[in-house]
């Protein structure tokens, strides 16, 4: 198949490289230029602008937020106008449920296909083809694309026939991750003020009941006060929480843990800490408890 | 060693049976009688009252709360007055940090030894000798007891020289478990209102980022609306949260997730649901979102 | 001056009538027709559409939300294009800080004037000319308009040179009102479960420390379980809280009371109670505490 | 009547002086000596110890917490053992509902009378005889005491036949006051970050919807960053909130605003600010928002 890929940030580049590695016919584009070069060396075509995607059967988008995706799809020129009937848009960005729903509608009107395919995993996982793929959309459509998706991740979950359901799952997953960070932050501050070594405490947790990757990853970042450089920016985590809360608003779901999380991100932002990993919210409890938030011990 | 065991509830009975199974010289006692019979058949002596523990070198206590432990240790007759100099009290109950500190002091004054050894694990784990043992107290003392403790659990963590530090870790651990239940409850309510099957959602979570036993266990109970019979009563979970909050109060640690958890338990109690598993707090979000909290699907 | 008034809901109609009563040259318009008739009888001209406002020196708008105001000002036809240079737009709607800022910018580009003038008070207060007027914008401009505003309310507060500052004050005020409702709901549920009559309790509060109109008004509605018909819809209160949280987000202000308030409105909405007064959030605490939320006693 | 007064802190001294001023036969006692002298000069007898209260018909107690009151009433010597049959204990301290209930029971067993009479008001109000008196206990008993109570305050509310009901009302009232402080703190931080003068904002609030004494008092303290010296210590406010939460726990009342308030007091305490007025929690929002919490402007 003739594949397109729009959005070559850290995640997008790694995913595009995977598609290329299995011999795909890949044309790529990024708003800012430099990002295309490495892929070009690996054999990708580089589009001059979005109009060059008119010949693509499938186009992946991996962009930072609603505004960026909206510009690429609904702008002028935009994929909606450019793609042929029957072409497939696979949207991997973490966006609002509302925008995903709107895109589904618009593509349908143009007799184009649309899948939402947000992913879980950091850039390393993307480069290794180990992302977790969450898919929303028609199952028949997904089945046609399975071979194409295989190099991206071994685990694929089809969560519903409506594309935006995948976006909702993604947002809820990031909400869950944020609760893990916050709850670890609170319990580690508590035991540390009781004179217990936080590293030993984390070892206890993660070698028993909480032996999940996320507890190890985020517990380690919190215990080591290791929030720079950011693997996932707090500002992005804040954005995703905001989107989850918007979804909760639209679906009418009270979520008592959302408020305290929101305030953590706002406190970080109020101090101007915009370059930190979102694990930083897990250090706020220590700060409020009068512990040194910087000391790595 | 001549061992004593006080408190033969579901956990205590299973632990005492393990001690017996490896050939220990075990004398047991329980406030209400019937509970001693199975252990007697397995070879344990049954004390008529606490005074019979005067010849014990080590006495384990596993009681439901501060009041029960206080009665057994500080009451009349009580272990404090009965035990010999040099005898060791191993306290396994989930109690306040303050009481544990007080007991350490009192035993020291009587030249007796005291270890806090709260455990993580349900009765099945206790019966299988697979508890996680958290120990606070003098390391030298712990080392003397290691052989004795081996049949109770393979994983043992010494968290500090002060006994009450183990109690703090235990309380913090139960706090973390409660946050897992609540956060799963919220995210499952969110996706379910978005039309996604909650069982499939849980499968996605636990086969990827959240592949920890606690997510599987509590996620399953929430998804199945399975809260009776209780493996761990909500009223006990509420008590433990209360103790964690008391510890946070004494140590001056703001914990924003504690308030919403407290309110969940109070809402359960206000409806008179006193016989449910503490997983029930994970169904409150669904209830508030207008989903059917009973429907098992 | 030649005055225009757009938006003749309960508030807008009452305000327009006040302007008319003091002999103003008033032309009115409302999206749905019927609302203009009473004012016409009192002497107002009725515009056929917004284009008829081209001769107006000052135009008030009082609309339900951002979308409605955006349509009137920026739509086609819209006031921005229709009004002459130097004409003044006085925006009384409760809208976002962001939209108010944008309107200020757009009017400036067209050399038109813009004041934000949100009000506190219910329709009765509007009819009696007893609104509290909060003004944001150039003081010199305000001074020119003072005679015109006098019939609307005796109390006028100029809070800043930037129009959107008035909108922020309005949103913060509604946030404060919501906290009063919630806190009264919680404390009344507490004492009522302690066997104390909630009406007597309210009498105690409002005749001593809490002798402010808002405690009397909302305390009475809560105590009487009187939430229908709505004087101010819960859905509008929810909207205003949402706007306040958006402002807090943009300004980076953690607000711990906002989360619980948000959840109250969502719980109401999840039960489908869309026609109730926002005082209804003050009955949620009683409901959760197991008290009868309907019984008026 | 022969009156006794135990507890001569700032509140107790002022109340005792009022009783003396109307010609009462007053005997006073305080744990630490110096406090009795001013009253002695005004004509009070000074008891050497509590045994001297054996001849008293009515004894007021005004102590700082449960422990202090428990020592005075149930200690050795204690009022319970010392007072005659038929003597009346009027307890003015802010204590737990549970202790008040227990005292009622104990006095009843000794055929003594017991009224709970917590008060609202600061020392200045006490000195001026303008306290708000909240009474729990038998109405007939209260009626006998009315002449005696008149010099303490003009406003008296009998809230129930069970003494502890008055204590519950007092705790709920302090909870409400704390919500006022917090909500003002949040809304003032919000508008201040929007460039609005917080003093002008407060003026707007208190001259319109929020024209209650508490908004003026606490709003002023927050706006002026005036938290030292303390009129009511944050540590006492924290204690009262704790007692309110214990009551809510016993009565099973979820109170979402309690958690954030609790965390505010803990954050203050974690920074070691133990000498500040409880209005200081109203400055925490500004601090978290990145505003200068000290600047008085």
Image (spheres, coloured by chain):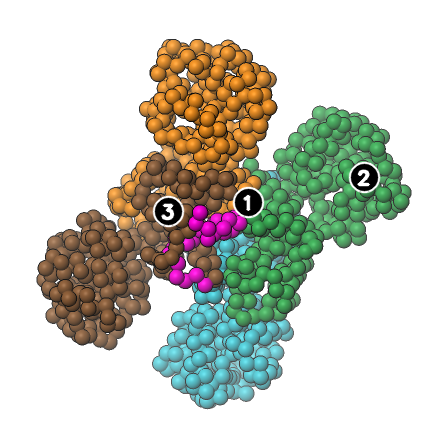
Chain colours: A brown, B orange, C cyan, D green
C117 to D251, vertically: above or below = below
> Which structural element holds mark 1?
loop
C-alpha distance separating marks 2 and 1: 33 Å
Q: Are marks 1 and 3 on the same chain?
A: no
Which residue is at 46% across, 87% downward? C111
C-alpha distance separating marks 3 and 2: 56 Å
Quarter of the image holding residue A94? bottom left
Residue under label 2: D33
Chain containing mark 2: D
Q: Residue A220 lies in magenta, yes or no?
A: no
Quarter of the image holding residue D294? bottom right
Chain containing mark 1: B
Quadrant containing the C terminus of chain D in the rendered view: bottom right
D155 to B167, vertically: above or below = below
Residue under label 3: A220
Which of the two marks, 3 or 2, is nearer to us in this view? 3
Side of D144 relative to A87 (left or right): right
Name the one closer to the observer, D131 or B80: B80
x, y percent for residue B79 = 54, 18
């Amino acid at each position: 198949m003739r594949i397109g890929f729009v959005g070559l940030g850290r995640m997008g580049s790694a995913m595009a490289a995977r598609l290329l590695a299995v011999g795909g016919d890949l044309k790529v584009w990024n708003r800012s230029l430099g990002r295309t070069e490495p892929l070009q060396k690996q054999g990708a075509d580089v589009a001059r602008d979005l109009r060059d995607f008119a010949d693509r059967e499938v186009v992946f988008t991996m962009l930072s937020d609603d505004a960026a995706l909206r510009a690429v799809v609904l702008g002028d020129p935009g994929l909606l106008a450019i793609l042929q009937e029957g072409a497939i848009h696979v949207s991997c960005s973490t966006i609002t449920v509302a925008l995903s729903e709107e895109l589904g509608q618009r593509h349908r009107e143009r007799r184009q296909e649309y899948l939402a395919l947000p992913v879980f995993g950091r850039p390393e996982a993307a480069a290794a083809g180990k992302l977790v793929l969450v898919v929303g959309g028609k199952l028949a459509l997904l089945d046609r694309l399975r071979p194409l998706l295989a190099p991206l991740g071994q685990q694929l979950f089809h969560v519903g026939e409506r594309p935006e359901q995948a976006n909702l799952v993604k947002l809820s997953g990031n909400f869950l991750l944020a609760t893990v960070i916050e709850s670890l932050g609170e319990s580690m501050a508590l035991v540390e003020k009781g004179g217990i070594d936080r590293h030993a405490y984390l070892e206890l947790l993660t070698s028993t009941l909480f032996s999940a990757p996320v507890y190890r990853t985020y517990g380690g970042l919190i215990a080591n006060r290791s929030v720079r450089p950011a693997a996932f920016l707090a500002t992005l985590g804040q954005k995703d929480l905001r989107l989850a809360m918007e979804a909760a608003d639209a679906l009418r779901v009270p979520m008592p843990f959302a408020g305290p999380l929101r305030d953590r991100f706002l406190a970080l932002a109020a101090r101007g800490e915009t370059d930190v990993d979102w694990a930083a919210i897990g250090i706020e409890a220590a700060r409020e408890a009068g512990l040194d938030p910087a000391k790595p011990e």
